Amino acid sequence: MARVDGDEFVVLLSGLVRAADARTVADRLLGAIRIPFQLAAGTVTITASSGIAIAESPLGDESAEALIARAQAAMHEAKARGSEHSGPLPGRAQRPRLARAQVAAPALAPTREPRRLQAQSELFDAVQSGSFELLYQPRIDVGSGAVVALEALLRWRRGQALVAPEAFLPLARESRLLRAIGCWVIEAACLQQEAWRAAGTPAPAITVNVDASDLGAADFVASSLAALDAHGLPASALRLEACAADLAGHGEALRDNLQALHAHGVGLGVDGIGGLDRAGLVAGPAAGVFEWAGVDDLPLATVALDRRLVARIDADVRLAAEVRRVCASARERGLRSVAVGVERASQLQALQHAGCDQVQGFLLAMPMPPAQYAAWMRQREARLAAHVAPARDGAS
C-alpha cells in the first residue's frame, strides 16, 4: 500500500486467482475505514470509494502510471455515482496478472460542522440498524377508480421525528450509503407486501423509487429478485421508478439490468417527464423530443409527469397543453401516464381532461403507515360494497 495523494492510496495485489478477488479485498478495506471512531465533536464515520483496474497482460505491457490512471478514473466514477466501487470485473476466462485497487477516503474538510458529522454518523447507524420506515400512498386509476399501485415513501426515524428523504438523501449520497438504503427499501416493501397478503389485505404492486446508480449496479437484478423470492412474491408485485433526467444517457449496464428485470416481470417507470426548463416554463417541442430520446429504448410501463406540471395544471393553459402532449405521447408508446402531487379537485379535473391515466396525491389519500393503509382499504371496500348492493337489489 502507498499513499499517492492527500486522501488517495494505491494497493498493489499480485497472484490473484480471479478478478473478483480484487473486489473482495477492496470490500475489506472499505469495511475497516467505515468503523466509527470518537472525536471531541462526537462519533464520526468515514466512507470511501474504490476504483479497480486489472492488468490482463504480462507485466511490462502497461506502465504503472497507466494502470494507476485507470484505477483513478474508476474511483472518480464511483464517487460521482455515490457508490463504493467502480471498475472492470473481467469474464470467467480471464485471469489477471496484476490488480491495483485505489481507495480514496474523503478528508474531513474544515467546512464540515460538528452537527453535519454527527448527522452522517447517525445516518450510518440508521443503515446498520434499519431505523427507517415506509409510508404507502395509493395510486388510483382515473377511469375505474381502482387502486393500481402503492408508492413506498421512505422516512428516517431520527429520534422522535420522521425525516423526509429530501433532507437526508444528499448526505446519504455523499456518504456512499445510497445503495444500502435502496436495498433496505426493496426488502422492507417486499416484507410488507407478504404481510398484507397473509392478512388478506388487498395489496397492489408497490412502487419503489430507485437511484439510477443503483439500477446499474452489478448485483441489483439478483438482489431485487432475491427479495421477491424470499417473501414468496411474483415479480409483478414490485415496480421500480427512477428520474428520467438521471436515466438519460444511461450506460449498457443499466439498460441490461432493466431489460433483465422487465423479462422477469418487474414493472418499470420514470418520473419527471415534461418539457419544462429550469425556470418551470414550457420549453417547447425540442424539450419533448429530448425527454423521450433519453428513455425511449428502455422497457417502461409508466411515465410520471414532472410535478411542476401537475402543481399548476389548473392555473396555466400552457402547462395543461403540455400535459396533454405528454399523455398523448405516452399513449402512443403503450405507456400509462401518472400524475403525482394531486391536491385540489381542479387539478384532478384538468388531469382527467388531459387524458392522464393514474393519479396520486393528498386529495385522494395521504401517505399511510401499513396498519392505517389496511384500515383505509377495508373502509374503501366496505363503501364500494354498500354502493353496489342497492344496485343489485334494484335489478332483481
Image (cartoon, rainbow, N blue to C red):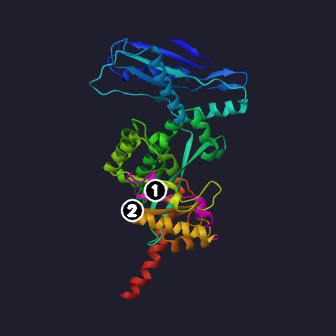
Q: Nearer the viewer, mark 2 or mark 1?
A: 1
Stretch of the chain drawn in magenta: 291-315
Q: Is residue 159 among what the camera can see?
A: yes
Reply above or below: 236 against 58. below
* Of residues 121 and 384, the one drawn nearer to the viewer in this rendering: 121
- Estimate the x, y position of residue 260 in percent, counting from the top left: 33, 45
Q: Circle 2 sits in a helix, a strand or a loop, which is it?
A: loop
Q: Is residue 313 magenta?
A: yes
Check disc 1 and give the amino acid type.
Trp
Reply above or below: 144 against 338. below
* Of residues 4 and 198, the one drawn nearer to the viewer in this rendering: 4
* Of residues 266 and 159, the one drawn nearer to the viewer in this rendering: 266
Q: Is residue 203 among what the camera can see?
A: no
Task: Identify which residue is drawn at 56% across, 13% down.
Answer: 3
Reply above or below: 76 against 4. below
Q: Is residue 286 magenta?
A: no
Q: Label 1 belongs to which residue?
A: 292
Q: Which numbered marker is on residue 333?
A: 2
Q: Circle 1 sits in a helix, a strand or a loop, which is it?
A: helix
Mark 2–mark 1 CB contact (< 8 Å): yes
